[in-house]
Image: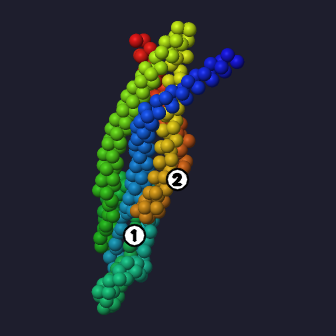
Amino acid sequence: MKIFVHSHRVFLAAIQNIFRNAWLGIATVIVLVLALTSVNLLVGMNVLIGNAVKLLEQKIDVTVFFKQNANEALVTQAKFFLAELPQVQSVELLQADAALEQFRARHAADAEILSALDELDGNPLGATLRITARAPSDYPFIIDTLKNPQFTDAIESKTYDDHADAIASVRSIGDYARKIGAILIAIFSLIGMLIVFNSIRVAIYTQREEIGIMRLVGASSFFVRAPFVIQGIALAIIALGITAGFVAIGIAWMDPMLTAAYGGDPGLRTYFSQAWPRLALIEGGGLSLLIGVTSWLAAGKYLKR
């Protein structure tokens, strides 16, 4: 019962401290919200960059154009030979007629090209192989494999649809943005700790007479410090809730635009829907611990004076 009474008094004192120093509390919450928003922006950006890289990697392939008079058996043999390679994920074979149909469909709006095709006596295209590797790093090996003398004479040309430059650019942008985000997080965290530290000191100063009386009647250091620690943790929880609302609104606002840009689900909503308990635990727990320790130190330093 005695513990319950003491706990009730500590929490009541913490609530009173929040209302007594409302403006300092609001300033603290704003800075903490900015810090948490920076963290979540960095997390969301990592998700988007990772998905953008995956989309680009999925579009990489090697297309092999065989000569018009290439032996059909040789083309089929090349397909099965490549499909057996552990570096190859899939091989698609288009016979000459199918390749011509795709070419016509791709240039359906270009009357000149279609007219030129109509003037030809036959099909100018040969069979085509479209090869997809398991990883972008496997493409150089596949290109070297196609230099096999057995197939070289039958190959008209080959194109390597290489998005490596685009992937490198996306990753470079991501690295740069992560560095900027880390700096912002550090700045806002430092500002937040300083504001919490000073707000606790101001709160103690405004209640110095009450604290002096409490100390005279035998109140422990813990009993004096605890309300200020709880005050700091409460502000951190409020900031976490506000940030969660901002993140939800931001995702709802950006998702349609990102879906159009990615040509499908960008994965942002899915990631936060699945990861929010872990993010809340890490961010909320880390922030509460940081603010709690800062509040404890601020109260202790001032009480020693």
Residue 294 can be seen, yes or no: no
| Picture mark count | 2
Q: Position of residue 137 (x, y in %)?
A: 36, 53
Q: Residue at x 32, y 71 (%)?
A: 155
Residue 166 versus residue 298: which sits nearer the camera? 298
Quadrant for residue 51, please give it.
Answer: bottom left
Q: Looking at the image, can residue 129 be seen?
A: yes
For label 2, the SS is helix
Task: Say which element carries label 1.
Answer: strand
Quarter of the picture holding the C terminus: top left
Camera-side residue of 28 and 273:
28
- Answer above or below: position of 107 versus 301: below
Instruction: Measure the C-alpha gap from mark 1 to mark 2.
Output: 36 Å
- Examine the image and state in which quarter residue 176 appears: top left
At which x and y percent is residue 193?
40, 29
Q: Residue at x 40, y 78 (%)?
A: 102
Along the line of sight, the residue nearer the viewer: 137 or 190:
190
Q: Can you give x and y, in whole percent of width and height, for residue 24 in the image?
A: 43, 32
Looking at the rendered structure, the kind of residue marked 1 is Leu
The residue at which mark 1 appears reads as 129
- Residue to which mark 2 is pinned: 270
Lateral position of residue 90 relative to residue 179, left or right: right
Tell whether 73 sits left or right of 153.
right
Residue depicted at x 53% and y 21%: 226
Residue at figure coordinates x 59%, y 26% from the top left: 12
Residue that protrudes farthest toward the right in the picture: 1
